């Protein structure tokens, strides 16, 4: 049996995809930036349930990093990634270089923009971030031609941006959400967690607890603004630099009194590491 295949050039990728499509096989894509952990591998497992073939892309996308962000130091572990993907049941790793992904160059690249849903929250804290995400995901869809793509719920707003992108441009790709994997403390698994010191790693669990407090308070009928303010103050007092704590409808629109399906989202820095998380919940009558 042939093991996992690692492909770096587009003609080889297209030949393999064409072969699978001729055989009538359904293809799933799991886009990643590498430095993979158990959360990523759970997305591969979810993809295996959706398709006959699973492709994982490993590409650190420069267009979604701001000028003061960590593109250069973003951890790259290609050998470990391939071993992990192979063990998780992935069929092919698509690992293009920047010139392959952006043949006209990064600065001259055609870019995508998803207005409204990408403008709030992360869109304010990281201007242009979702333009970069939408741009690279569009290219991956055109390159891999998947029937289904799996994205994690941890990046809740990113998932909403991609769903809007697919709906508005009629990409023939079904979007499936994978559940957030958490460490024993409740901290959402993320490649950036390794930037945390041992003490910060333990302290970072307070982020999830803050989400739980907001969801419990608002879920029981408590006032949204007061719950958000209390969580923000508690995290600030605990040493976090809070970008936002926000409660939104499940579709990320502002909350109305009659809305029941809600999500609380947070982004905060602890030391030099920026963490994001969210928790979906239902508000009772």
Image (cartoon, rainbow, N blue to C red):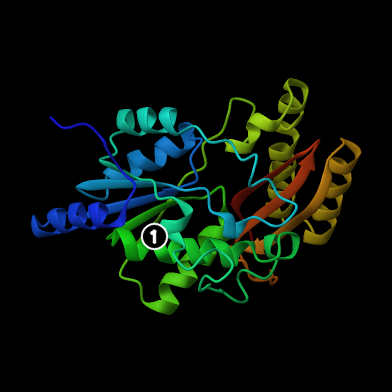
Location of the N terminus (image quadrant): top left
Q: Quadrant of residue 108?
A: bottom right
Viewer-closest of 261 and 151: 151
Residue at 44%, 50% (x, y): give it.
97
Observer able to see residue 283: no
Q: Quadrant of residue 78?
A: top left
Location of the C terminus (image quadrant): bottom right
Residue at 53%, 66% (x, y): give it.
161
Position above or below: 34 against 260:
above
**Residue 132, horizontal then vertical, whole percent:** 57, 63
Q: Residues within 10 Å of mark 1 (few under 14, many from 20)?
A: some
Question: In the picture provided, is 5 more to the left or to the right than 80?
Answer: left
**Residue 173, horizontal then vertical, whole percent:** 33, 65
Residue at 73%, 32% (x, y): give it.
204
Position above or below: 143 against 32:
below
The residue labelled by disc 1 is: 140
Viewer-closest of 238 and 269: 269
Residue at 30%, 56% (x, y): give it.
10
């Amino acid at each position: 049996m042939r093991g996992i295949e690692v492909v770096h050039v587009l003609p080889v990728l297209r030949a393999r995809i064409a072969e699978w499509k001729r055989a009538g096989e359904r293809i799933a894509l799991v886009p990643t930036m590498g430095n993979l952990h158990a959360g990523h591998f759970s997305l591969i497992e979810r993809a295996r349930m959706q398709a006959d073939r699973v492709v994982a892309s490993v590409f650190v996308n420069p267009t979604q990093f701001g000028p003061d962000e960590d593109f250069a130091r973003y951890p790259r572990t290609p050998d470990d990634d391939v071993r992990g993907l192979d063990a998780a049941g992935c069929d092919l790793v698509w690992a293009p270089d920047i010139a392959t992904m952006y043949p006209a160059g990064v600065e001259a690249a055609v870019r995508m923009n998803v207005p409204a849903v990408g403008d709030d929250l992360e869109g304010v804290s990281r201007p242009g971030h979702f333009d970069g995400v939408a741009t690279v995901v569009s290219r991956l869809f055109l390159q891999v031609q998947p029937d289904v793509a799996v994205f994690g719920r941890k990046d809740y707003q990113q998932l909403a941006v991609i769903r809007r992108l697919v709906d508005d441009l009629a990409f023939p790709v079904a979007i499936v959400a994978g559940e957030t994997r958490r460490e024993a403390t409740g901290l959402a698994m993320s490649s950036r967690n390794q930037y945390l010191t041992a003490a910060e790693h333990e302290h970072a669990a307070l982020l999830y607890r803050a989400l739980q407090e907001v969801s419990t308070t608002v879920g029981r009928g408590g006032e949204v603004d007061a719950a958000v303010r209390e969580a923000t103050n508690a995290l600030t007092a605990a040493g976090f630099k809070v970008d936002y704590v926000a409660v939104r409808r499940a579709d990320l629109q502002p909350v109305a009194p009659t809305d029941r399906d809600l999500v609380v989202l947070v982004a905060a820095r602890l030391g030099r590491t920026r963490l994001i998380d969210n928790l979906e919940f239902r508000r009772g009558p």
